[in-house]
Amino acid sequence: MSRWFLGIFGRILPLLLLWSGLCAKGHAATWPLIFPTPREVDARSERFSLDPFVPILVPQAASLEDLALARFLVAELSDKHGMAFKTRRASALPATGPFILMGGAGNPLIQEYLKGRGAEAAVRSPEGYLLEVDAHAVIIAGADEAGAFYGLQSLRQLIQGEAAHKFVPGIHVRDWPAKPFRGIKLYLPGHENIAYFNRFVRDFLALYTTESSWS
């Protein structure tokens, strides 16, 4: 058996065991699971309904990173869930929801949210994030742009439901890496497979190799 096969199998085996455990115990239906397991997770009884009229908010002077996060989520909801969401620029947080907001510490809407909750200290660890979901809003507040990106990967795993009845379970998550560097060994493909490789990195590696447990 080749070293290449053993290396790939060794990386995939934990995910296979996780998936089989969920199928056997049915945890996916009762507990909003995120893999790797964040440092702080608190499930709530409410849920956020993913209706296409819900805006993904970005600041009036949105940064390239803010726009990239919003586009990532729009593409995810369209490609994977068949739902057409749109971004909306805002100068301040709406008085009421529903809305989705994502961004790093430099995002003025994120600053307004954290200040209003007295939660500025909750997202100070480099590459850390705070994910809050209730019936009115989904908030991803990153300590920096990397943290906001990792928070989005956790949100992707939480989306549940059937067809036009998608939702995100109510939850409080706080996470940050144990080490400053995370790596994974990959064999680069030939030129003809670069497009597939990019999708693999986006849809699999970014989704399952973030934050504390794989740090």
Image (tube, rainbow, N blue to C red):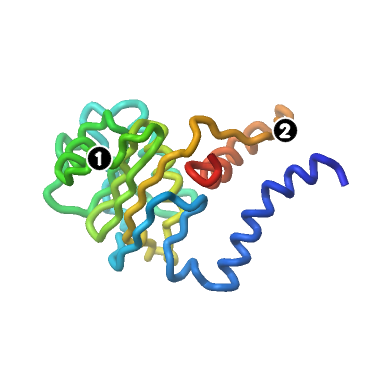
Q: Earlier in the sequence, mark 1 or mark 2?
A: 1
Q: State which mark lies toward you, 1 or 2.
A: 2
- Compared to residue 2, the image places residue 25 above or below, namely below
Residue at the spot x=14%, y=43% of the render? 116
The percent coordinates of residue 180 (x first, y second) are 49, 30
Callout 2 secondary element:
loop
Residue at the spot x=25%, y=38% of the render? 121
Does residue 61 appear to the left or right of 79 in the view shown?
A: left
Does residue 176 appear to the left or right of 193 in the view shown?
A: left
- Please give the label number shown on residue 187: 2
Instruction: Name the residue furthest front.
Output: 178
The image quarter in which residue 184 lies: top right
Q: Is residue 77 shown to the viewer in this render?
A: no
Q: Are marks 1 and 2 in contact (CB under 8 Å)?
A: no
Residue at the spot x=17%, y=43% of the render? 118
The percent coordinates of residue 190 (x first, y second) are 74, 29
Q: Residues within 10 Å of mark 2 (few under 14, many from 20)?
A: few
* Gap in angstroms between the C-alphas marked 1 and 2: 40 Å
**Which residue is nearer to you in this view: 24 or 49?**
24
Instruction: Name the residue furthest bottom.
Output: 25
Q: Amino acid at mark 2?
A: Tyr
Residue at the spot x=68%, y=54% of the render? 13
The percent coordinates of residue 21 (x first, y second) are 60, 66
The image quarter in which residue 51 lies: bottom left
Q: Amino acid at mark 1?
A: Arg
- Compared to residue 96, the image places residue 149 above or below, namely above
Q: Which residue is mark 1?
A: 88
Callout 1 secondary element:
strand
The percent coordinates of residue 1 (x first, y second) are 88, 47
Q: Is residue 180 shown to the viewer in this render?
A: yes
